[in-house]
Image (spheres, grey):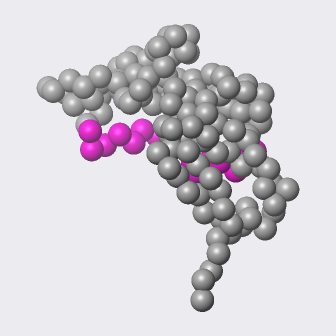
Amino acid sequence: MKKVILNKCYGLFSVSPKAYFLYAKKINKELYCYRGNHNSKDGFVYTKESLEDFIKNEPDLLYFYSFADCGDIVHLSSFNDEVEGHLILDGKHRFDPILIEVIEELGDAASGKYSELRVVEIPDDVAEDYMIDDYDGIEILHKKVTEY
């Protein structure tokens, strides 16, 4: 059996700030938080914040986590939001054993603001040939079926 992470509520697959930091700790990397604000003159401006501030007021949209200390303020245009060292824990990480461990360890505290992440076990043959149905964020994993 293999483990996989699915979102089980309306919303989206998102990971909490606590989970991001535990993930970074488990891979022995320091992590920095940046919250964004739109500034019409400068595009997007991101300000470094502490983990405690991110936990108290979890960001909705404009934010990023980085292994690189990008300084206190980062200017990014809306068309160029790639920064070296970004950590983005999303649906592409649903089979990541470290993220699975983090979610199992933190429980509900691992889920982001609009998610309810759950670790489920699936047969090995499904893990290699699967599809995820998503109804407004609620995910269901199925084995792919080929019709003739």
Looking at the image, the residue that sits furthest to the bottom is 148
Residue 132, placed above or below residue 20: below
What residue sits 35% from the left and 24% below the top?
Answer: 36
Where is residue 88 drawn, in percent x and y? 53, 39
Q: In which quarter of the image is the C terminus?
A: bottom right
Where is residue 64 drawn, in percent x and y? 45, 31
18 to the left or right of 69: right
Please report the bounds of the magenta region as a residue range: 78-97
Q: Quadrant of the N terminus?
A: bottom right
Main SS, magenta residues: loop
What residue sits 15% from the left and 27% below the top?
Answer: 40
Residue 128, placed above or below residue 17: below
Q: Can residue 105 be seen in this view?
A: yes
Where is residue 59 drawn, in percent x and y? 44, 22
Number of on-image labels: 0
Instruction: Residue 111: name its quadrant.
Output: top right
